């Protein structure tokens, strides 16, 4: 159900603002090019019966008066899934990644509750500007979560050029000891494939190097993801990690590899994909938090970033200076819940439960986080001057069309790289296993 009290409670004010009475406004719900339901505007739009039998995913709700669009919102629904939440959770625990950060990383994945409700945010007097259908609105940061839950317009933008004067989000850095990683589950009925997404949320993306110094790349809110794709028989077939925006040139070291797709796809499982058991090792870029298939240096326009950690063996092969220290700092490794260590922290693994996504939270439970309600906001969370604005899950490309997200990724060919690259990844995994077992 989509509740629209602002239309029914004050019809005269509505008519004055939009030039038409509420009863003259029509609503339409579409999935792609298919019209799923339609009707005349009232206090609510009920879609329960209309969504039965529909494949899960994003539906677009549009309110219009004649040719004028008054409201447009993406709505996420998964009416039927082949796996129960407990089975999905078991798969998530089985394949949850080991995250390897750089020695200088200062930000770590936080829960949605921390992202929008950390003490510093709740105490802030700052506001964020949003251009709404009722005019420009200054939303207090302390009430941002509430605004997102009840204002899902897909064209709204959290204007970062006019807020966070107190630099509140810059200071919400998280900690390895209370880090949170989320997961979601998608199914493609047409192909029988399924997709297990892991999501990391950060309050701030400081970038690194020149981009950080010039202030042209850092931004509030950041989301990164990796996907394990399963074939129609339920077996894992691919691992996709996302680095940066599409059509952005990415160069691995100086000349080892070049691609523009923003994400890469690896065969999985594969002996070349290092990990601890079924848990793939995923290097995280310093500052930007981009995910890469191999530890090393990555060059983008105006940005060079280190993903993970370098050992002397790879540096010797590439003719680089050896790192100052071979061993990891305690903050560099985040383990999944099924792996525990005397030294490194294990993150919380929490389902997004997109099949339950709604504005009003349900009671908290082992497989439900009430703070996920903020994700009903289908507008743009990330506002980066000069770049493309970005949405948050479940309204990113990887969820809207997971098959295309996986199949359109750059195919990572380990054989086209020096063997030392994959060997270096395996050496990192072995070092993590060794350091994890060592006394703290």
Image: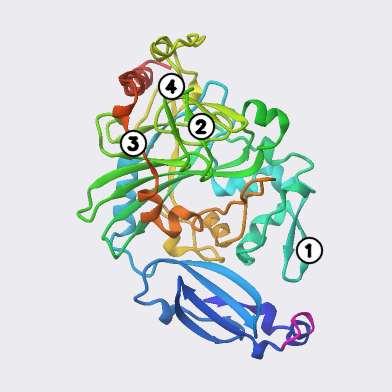
Instruction: Report if the CB atoms under discs 1 and 3 are less than 8 Å apart.
Output: no
- Name the disc covering residue 338, or none: 3
Which disc is residue 343 wearing?
4
Q: Nearer the viewer, mark 1 or mark 3?
A: 1
Residue 275 visible, this orientation: no
Residue 179 spot, x, y in % from top left: 51, 37
Q: What residue is pinned by disc 1? A: 136
Q: Is residue 198 visible?
A: yes
Q: CA distance from mark 1 to mark 2?
A: 39 Å
User: Does 17 lie within the magenta span?
Assistant: yes
Task: Give me the C-alpha separation between circle 4 and circle 1.
Answer: 49 Å
Q: Residue at x 61, y 62 (%)?
A: 149
Q: Quadrant of residue 144?
A: bottom right
Provide the major secondary structure of the magenta segment.
helix
- 384 or 410, nearer to the observer: 410
Neighbours of disc 4 within 10 Å: few (<14), some (14-19), many (20+): some
Residue 101: within the magenta? no
Query: Which quadrant of the figure has residue 339?
Result: top left
Q: Residue 6 is drawn in which quadrant?
A: bottom right
Magenta range is 16-20
């Amino acid at each position: 159900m989509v509740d629209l009290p602002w239309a029914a409670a004050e019809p005269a004010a509505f008519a004055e603002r939009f030039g038409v009475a509420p009863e003259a406004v029509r609503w339409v719900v579409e999935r792609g090019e298919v019209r799923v339901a339609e009707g005349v505007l009232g206090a609510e739009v009920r879609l329960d019966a209309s969504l039965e039998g529909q494949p899960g995913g994003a539906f677009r709700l549009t309110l219009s008066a004649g040719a004028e669009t008054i409201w447009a919102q993406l709505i996420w629904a998964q009416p039927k899934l082949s796996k129960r939440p407990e089975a999905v959770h078991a798969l998530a625990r089985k394949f949850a990644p080991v995250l390897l950060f750089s020695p200088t990383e200062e930000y770590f994945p936080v829960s949605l509750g921390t992202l929008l409700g950390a003490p510093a945010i709740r105490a802030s007097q700052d506001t964020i500007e949003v251009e709404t259908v009722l005019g420009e609105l200054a939303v207090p940061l302390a009430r941002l979560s509430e605004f997102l839950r009840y204002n899902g317009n897909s064209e709204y933008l959290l204007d970062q050029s006019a807020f966070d004067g107190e630099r509140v989000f810059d200071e919400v850095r998280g900690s390895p000891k209370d880090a949170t990683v989320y997961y979601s589950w998608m199914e493609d009925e047409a192909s029988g494939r399924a997709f297990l997404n892991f999501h990391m949320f950060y309050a701030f993306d400081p970038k690194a190097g020149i981009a950080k110094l010039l202030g042209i790349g850092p931004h509030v809110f950041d989301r990164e993801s990796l996907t394990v794709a399963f074939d129609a028989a339920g077996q894992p077939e691919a691992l996709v990690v996302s680095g940066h925006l599409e059509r952005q040139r990415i160069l691995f070291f100086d000349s080892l590899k070049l691609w523009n797709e923003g994400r890469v796809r690896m065969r999985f499982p594969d002996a070349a994909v290092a990990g601890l058991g079924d848990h793939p090792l995923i290097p995280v870029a310093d500052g930007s938090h981009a995910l890469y298939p191999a530890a090393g240096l990555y060059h983008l326009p105006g940005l060079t970033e280190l993903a993970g950690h370098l050992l002397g063996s790879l540096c010797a092969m590439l003719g680089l200076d050896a790192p100052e220290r071979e061993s990891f700092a305690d903050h560099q490794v985040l383990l999944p819940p099924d792996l525990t260590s005397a030294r490194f922290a294990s993150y919380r693994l929490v389902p997004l439960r997109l099949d339950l996504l709604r504005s009003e939270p349900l009671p908290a439970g082992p497989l439900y986080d009430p703070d996920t309600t903020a994700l009903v906001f289908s507008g743009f969370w990330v506002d980066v001057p000069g770049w493309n604005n970005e949405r948050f899950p479940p309204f990113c490309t990887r969820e809207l069309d997971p098959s295309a997200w996986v199949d359109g990724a750059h195919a990572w060919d380990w054989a086209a790289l020096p063997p030392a690259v994959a060997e270096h990844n395996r050496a990192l995994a072995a070092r993590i296993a060794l350091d994890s077992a060592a006394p703290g």
